[in-house]
Amino acid sequence: MLKTNKIMKLIFLPILLFFLFFLIVPLLYMFWQSFKIGNVVTTQNYIEALRNIEIREAFTNSFKVSFVASVITTILAFWLAYAVHFTTMHRHTKKLVQIGITLPMLLPTITYGFVLIYTFGNQGILTKLVGQPLFTIYGYNGLVIGYVLYTLPVAFILMQNSMQYIDKRFLLVSILMHDQPMRRFYHTVYRPMVGTIGGAFILTFVLSFTDFGIPASVGGNYRVIATELYQAMLGSIVHFERGAVISVLMLVPAVLGVVMLTILERFNFQYKQVGQSELVKHRLRDALFTIYSILCVTAVCIIFSTMFIVPFTKGYPYDFSFTLEHVQNVLAEKDLTKVYINSLIVAILTAILGVGITFMSALLNTRTPLKGRKSLDVTSMMTNTVPGMVLGLSYLFFFNGSSLKGTFLIIIACNIVHFFTTPYLMAKNSLQKMDPTWEVTAELLKDSWLKTVIRIILPNIRPTIYQMFSYYFLNAMVTVSGVIFLVSTKTMLVSTRIKELQHFAKYTDIFVLSIFILCTNLIVKLGCDYIAAHKEKTEEITK
């Protein structure tokens, strides 16, 4: 028993030190820097920032555009999830929705802006078909559409995960009691989903508020807080103190979001037993939701189709002749292929190390009596709260001048911390569902704790491990905001190189690199999903 406790502590201590060194200390250091002018500690930086019209305008604009985008996204996601779980829409259409709506997750957000320009801009595909621009894509309009595209997959996944646990037998009871359709909908679908709807709204708001990729491409002259932070740190004139203050201000909506999520938890429903029953067919309802679902997926596909048209045309928008010249040029450029390889290295190492740290954190928290293990839950809440740009900037401040600056290690550490929450909760939920007596039985059989973990727990959690690997890999490939302040010329990634290519108007190169990212992420995601599903089937057959 003493030996087991010693092993647990030997694993727990490095994990604690990792988060202390790569999360707590950098954030505290950045917070401290926000109060400094030279060697003097003062609140002057905050007073100046709050008086600054540009920062106030950017903050207000970010709030306004994020709020509108979040309302639209939440409504769209709710009805899409409803179509999948509460209608008798054809199963192929349901599958199409689940795949089509989540595809944008496999691309960097900065690419969203460029596909919007090539769809709705003056030379855009839809503009050419209609004959004139439908609206101005730069500024407010582009940001709203971009944020909706960015956050819709996340909100949809959240909604449909929650809807699958709603007991559908209550619908049947409501029909038998001759309830009015609105009353039935309110009590059997909407009321159990209130907590999730609120959670989806808050999550999409925070994601929109803190995103940098979309404003970087279609923001135009419309000031938002993320671009203000970028200009403060990497603009023509560097303002370190202003950057630190903006970062702290960006934490405010995220912290308020976490507080509101805890309040919304009281609205969550828990059924003693989730029962399933056949849904009643309703031709008009099913037809309307089929049309709605296909329209949503078609809109997403049309917008992103430009990414596959432009790079394979000789001279868009004047010459639509097919060519592979642009792809060959990108492959011929050693600089661009090196950037792609850099992204692969970072994504693979982030996924491997991230899964290791996350799995051990969840394991120590759920299946050991270790003192202080609940601090990992607090860490999870913190990583969920801190935006990527803020975390990246805290690293820039703290590691400036150190040997870690501009290295792959610092980028990988940032990614592991930034995306820690979701894989941690995946592992935690899976481990909690497992038989709690396994370790006790193994101990009685004289097996060590580590042997039990390797022989019993790991094989049973393997499908979740693949999902965690996939999550870390995909996000490491597409992140922009988390690493924009950390890359150097040697460690440049595809997602950050796209930002550079924008200045030279090399949009075909941007789309080719985006296609590389999409294909890579698709291969990894489908591979992980297939292996996880295959393992689950094998285990069921064995049982």
Image (spheres, rainbow, N blue to C red):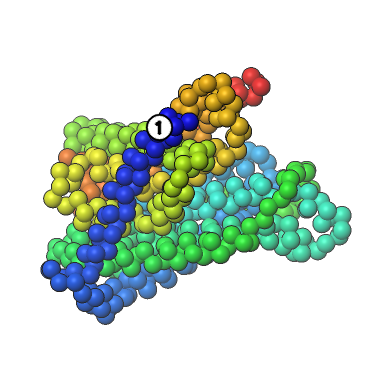
In this rendering, does residue 51 appear at all?
yes
Against 249, residue 5 (above or below) is: above
Query: Is 400 on the left-hand or right-hand side of 63?
Result: left
Residue, x 33% and y 40% (percent of image)? 14
How many labels were placed on the picture?
A: 1
Question: Which residue lies most toward the front here?
Answer: 2
Query: Which quadrant would the C terminus be assigned to in this image?
Result: top right
Query: Is 96 on the left-hand or right-hand side of 491?
Result: right
Residue 174 position, x and y percent, is: 82, 57
Residue 295 position, x and y percent, is: 56, 52
- Is residue 115 or residue 314 the one in the foreground? 115
Q: Residues within 10 Å of mark 1 (few under 14, many from 20)?
A: few
In this rendering, does residue 516 appear at all?
no
Kindly state the secondary structure of the residue where label 1 is placed.
helix
Residue, x 58% and y 52% (percent of image)? 159
Task: Name the image quarter holding residue 273.
Answer: top right
- Is residue 338 or residue 349 the one in the foreground? 349
- Is residue 195 or residue 378 the one in the foreground? 378
- Is residue 459 or residue 514 the one in the foreground? 459
Against 535, residue 503 (above or below) is: below
Residue at the spot of label 1: 7
Residue, x 21% and y 54% (percent of image)? 398
Task: Name the image quarter holding residue 48.
Answer: bottom left
Residue, x 42% and y 62% (percent of image)? 254
Residue 504 position, x and y percent, is: 19, 51
